[in-house]
Amino acid sequence: MTDTLDAFRDAILQASQDKTPLCLQGGGSKRWYGETPQGEPLDTRAYRGVVAYDPAELVITARCGTPLAEIEATLAEQNQMLAFEPPHFGPDATFGGMVAAGLSGPRRAGAGALRDFILGARLMDGRGQTLSFGGQVMKNVAGYDVARLLAGSLGTLGLILEASLKVLPRPFAEATLRFEMDEATALATLNAWAGQPLPVSANVWHDGVLHLRLSGATAAVAAARDKLGGEKLDDAEAHSFWRALREQAAPFFAARAPEESLWRLALPSSAAPVALPGAQLIEWGGGQRWWRSDADAATVRGLAEAAGGHATLFRGQDRAAGVFTPLPAPLMAIHRKLKAAFDPAGVFNPGRLYAGL
Amino acid sequence: MSHPNTLPPDPADRAELIATLTAALAGCRLLTDAEDTTPYECDGLSAYRRVPLAVALPETEDEVRHILKTCHALRVPVVPRGAGTGLSGGAMPIENGLVLSLARFKHILKVDPVARTATVQPGVRNLAISDAAAPYGLYYAPDPSSQIACTIGGNVAENSGGVHCLKYGLTVNNVLKVRAITMDGEPVEFGSLAPDAPGLDLLGVFIGSEGMFAVVTEVVVRLVPKPQTAQVIMASFDDVARGGDAVAAIIAAGIIPAGLEMMDRACARAVEEFVHAGYDTDAAAILLCESDGTPEEVAEEIARMSAVLEASGATRIRVSQSEAERLKFWSGRKNAFPAAGRLAPDYYCMDGTIPRRHIGTLLTRIAEMEREYRLRCINVFHAGDGNMHPLILFNGNDADEWRRAELFGADILETCVELGGTVTGEHGVGVEKINSMCVQFSPEERDAFFAVKHAFDPSGLLNHDKAIPTRARCAEYGKLHVHHGRLPHPELPRF
Ligand SMILES: Cc1cc2nc3c(=O)[nH]c(=O)nc-3n(C[C@H](O)[C@H](O)[C@H](O)COP(=O)(O)OP(=O)(O)OC[C@H]3O[C@@H](n4cnc5c(N)ncnc54)[C@H](O)[C@@H]3O)c2cc1C
Ligand SMILES: Cc1cc2nc3c(=O)[nH]c(=O)nc-3n(C[C@H](O)[C@H](O)[C@H](O)COP(=O)(O)OP(=O)(O)OC[C@H]3O[C@@H](n4cnc5c(N)ncnc54)[C@H](O)[C@@H]3O)c2cc1C
C-alpha cells in the first residue's frame, strides 16, 4: 500500500508542479454527477481494503478504493449497515467516491445523512502531505471538523485516502406500507407523522401513492402498523422497491425523456407543493423533491429559492446554468480560501463543484 | 496577515484604547471598570483567568456588527461569550481583548411545529428550547448536563453533546442553519432549512470551531418528537473491565441505548452519599442503560438489554419501575460533578474519548497515575461513546497540587490519544488542552487548521491563540513533554 501512496503523491506533486488538473476517480459510477470532470484521471482503486472494523465500536475505517459493495457486505455479516443508505449508481462504486459525492438514500429520512456519520478522514493534499482529521471515536472535538468538510466535497479539496464512518445495527424489524393520497395530503401527513414518535425510516410519494417504511424494534413496527393502517407490501417486494428507489432505477427515473432533465429540489420538508411541467417524486418527508422536467434552469431555481431551498441539475444535458445552485459571494470567498489552503495549485477536480474552485 | 498579539497596545496604552472604544461604541452597553469586568475573567474552568479590556453586551445584530467592525479597525481581539459554562477556557478573555457577551440575545424567535424547527438567538439556554417545544410534543435532543445554564451559541461553538447523543446525535447533527457575523462585521449564513446546503459543508466545520470563525447571532435547530416513555436499567459489576465488556456486548447485540453511562466505585460512593439514590456502593462499576420510545419498543428493548447484561456477568440488575424511580437512578449520574465537589475543594474534569474496548485499560492506567501524581481521581463517563470524564480531585490553594493535577490531566489525555482516541470529546480544546493538541496532530495538520481559521477570519482577531497550538508552542512543549507520567528529572523533589 505504501507503493500506491507513493504513486499518488508523485502524480499529485507532478500535477501541482505542472499546474495540470487531476480527475480523482473511483469506479466512475458518479462521473455524471456535478460539473463535467476535467483532467488526467487518477484512479483510486488500487488503494483498497477495510483498515479496521469492530462491530462493537460501531465504526468502520476503510481505504478510498474499497468497493462500496464490499463494505456493505462486510457490515451485513455483522448485521450492521451504513444507515444513510448510500446510492451506488453502479457496481463499481467506491467508498471514497461515496464520501466525496456525499449522497444519501431513502433512509436519510429517519437516520440522518452521510455527513452525520463521518467520524474521521485521511486526506492527501495538493502538497502531497497526508493529513488526518477527526478519528475513529464517536465524539471528537479536537481541531476543526475538516473530515465533515470532505463529505460532499466532490474531490475538490484533495484525495480522500481513508474515512471512518459510524455504522448502525440493522433494525430488528421492517415493514413497508402503501397509501393512496394526493400530493398536498401526503406532504401534510408526512410532516405530521415526523412530529410523532413513529419509527419511520423512509418514505416516497409519487403519482398519488405514498410508500412508507417502518424500521425498529419488532413491537414498535407492529404498533405503528396498527396505528397507521395502509396496505403492507410483501417483504421481498419491499426490498426491491427501496433498492430501486435508492439506485434511481425506479420507473419514475427510467421514464425520463431525452429532452427532460432530472432536477433535485431540496426544500424545507413543510414547503407547499411546487409546480413545474413534467413529473415529480418526493422523498425524505418532503425534503427532497425530484422533478423530471424540461423547464429551464432559471425557472426551477427560482421556484426552489422561493420555497426556501435550492435545486441541483442531477441528470441532464444542458449544464450552461451550472449544476449546483450558485453561492452567495461571502460563502464563495470562504470556499476559494479553503480550496487554496488544501490545493494551492488547483489540481484536484477543478470546476467539478463550481467554476473557479 | 499580521499577528494580532503584537498589535494591541501594551498595557500602558490600555486606558487610551478603552477611551477610543468607549467613544466608538457610544450607545452600546460597554463595561470597562475592573469591578464590572472581573466576573468575565473566566468560564467554567476557573483555574485560568484574565481580566478583559472591556465587555460589550449588545442587544441587536447591528450592534454586534458595529462592535466587530470597530474592533477590526482598531485590531482589538474579540472573545464571544455565552453563559460561560465552558470547561476548556474557550470564553476566557484574551490579553487586551474585548469580551462580546451574547447574554442579551435571549429570544426564541419562532417554533415551527410542522417543520419541526426552532429559530433562536444565541443566548437562549439549551433547556429553554425544549421547554418552548414541549407543547408540541417536540424537544431539542442534545442535552449537555449544563443544559439549564449553557446557551445554544456556546453549544454550536463547542459541538456539545449529552447523555443521549449516541442515539440522537451531537449539536452538529441537530442544527440546520446558523447566522453569524464575521470579524469584519459582515453577516453570513451557513446551512439551510432544506437538506444539504449547496457547496462544501461549511456548517459542519463551523460547528465546533470554538468561537474562532464568526459570532453566531441566530440558530435554527431541528426538533424531534419526545419519546413516549423511557426506562433505565441500573446494573452492578464486580469488575470495571467486565462492565466495559458489557457495554460492548450491548452494542454488539444490535441495541443503541438512549443513554449508556458508567461510573466507578469511588464515584458511585461519592454520589450515593450526596443523593441517596440507592446506588450499589459495593460494586466496582455501575452501568446505567436507558431505553426510550413507544411503550412496546421500550419493553422489548429492556428485556433484550437485561438479558445481555446478565450474560455479561452483572451482579445486580434493577429496572426503573416508574418515572420517579428512573429520575432517581439518573440523579446520581447527573450529580456526579457536585458530588465530586464535596470530596475535595476542587476537581479538574477531563474529557478524552477512546474506543470502547479500551475503557478497562484506561481505567487501570488512571489508577496507576493516581499513585504517580498523589491525587485521587474518580471516573464517570459516557460509556456508550467512550467519552471519559475522569475528575481529578485537588486543592486549588495548594499550587503544587494544581500543578500535579494539570500534569495528571495531560497524562490522561495523551493516554487517550495513544489508545486511538482524542483529547476532547465534547468540551473543546480552548486554552486548556492546547498543548495536548501537539501530541494528537502533526505540524502539517495544525497548519491546515490555521488555514481553515484564516478562510473564515483572515484578521485572526477572533478568539485567537486557542484550540490550535502554533509550531513554536509545540516545540516549547516538546522540550517539557511529560511522557507516561514520567516527569523530566524525576530525581528532583517536586515541592
Ligand atoms: C447520527 C444520528 C443517529 C440517529 N440514530 C437514531 C436511532 O438510532 N433511532 C432513532 O429513533 N433516531 C435516530 N436519529 C434521529 C432521527 O434521525 C431523526 O428523528 C430524523 O433524522 C428526523 O428527520 P427530519 O426529517 O427531521 O430530518 P432530516 O431533514 O431528514 O435531517 C436528517 C439529518 O440531515 C441533516 N440536515 C437536515 N437538514 C439539513 C440542512 N438543511 N443542512 C444540513 N444538514 C441537514 C441534519 O443534520 C439531520 O441530522 C439519529 C439521528 C442522527 C443524526
Ligand atoms: C456542570 C457542567 C456540566 C457540563 N456538561 C456538559 C455535557 O454534558 N456535554 C457538553 O458537551 N458540555 C458540557 N459542559 C460544558 C459547557 O456547558 C458546554 O461547552 C457549553 O456548550 C458552553 O456553553 P456556554 O453558553 O456556557 O458557552 P461559553 O462557555 O460562554 O463559551 C464556550 C465557547 O463558545 C464560544 N461562544 C459562545 N457563544 C458564542 C457565539 N454566540 N458565537 C460564537 N462563539 C460563541 C465562546 O467563545 C467559547 O469559545 C458542562 C459544563 C458544566 C459546568
Image (cartoon, coloured by chain):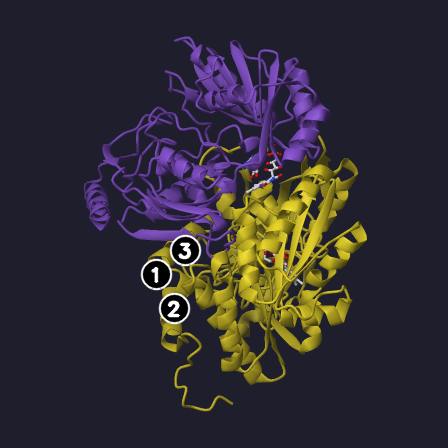
- Location of the C terminus of chain A (image quadrant): top left
Q: Secondary structure at mark 2?
A: helix
| Structural crowding at the residue carrying mark 3, measured as other residues with C-alpha within 10 Å and reported as few (<14), some (14–19) or many (≥20) | some
Residue B53 appears in the figure:
yes
Name the disc covering residue B443, or none.
1
Q: Is residue B36 visible?
A: no
Q: Chain of mark 2?
A: B
Q: Residues within 10 Å of mark 1 (few under 14, many from 20)?
A: some
Q: Amino acid at mark 3?
A: Phe
Left or right position of A182 against B181: right
The color chain B is rendered in? yellow
Amino acid type of the residue that numbered disc 2 sits on in the rendered structure: Cys
- The quarter of the displayed image where residue A314 is located: top left
Q: Nearer the viewer, residue A248 or B135?
A: A248
Residue B389, percent from left and from top: 58, 64
Ligand 2: does it lie within 8 Å of the C-beta at label 2?
A: no
Please tell me if label 3 and label 1 are on a single chain: yes
Query: Up-down: is B149 above or below B413?
Result: above
User: Which chain is drawn using purple?
Assistant: A
Circle 3/circle 2 CB separation < 8 Å: no
User: Which of the two labelled residues, at mark 1 and mark 2, occupies the earlier sequence position?
Assistant: 1
User: Image height check: is B467 above or below A3?
Assistant: below
Which residue is identified by label 3?
B450
Mark 3 vs mark 2, foreground winner is 2
Q: Which residue is mark 2?
A: B474
Q: CA distance from mark 3 to mark 1?
A: 11 Å
> Rounded to the nearest whole Å, what is the CA distance between mark 3 and mark 2?
14 Å
The residue marked by circle 3 belongs to what chain?
B
Q: Kindly identify the residue that appears in the image at 41 percent across and 54 percent down.
A: B449
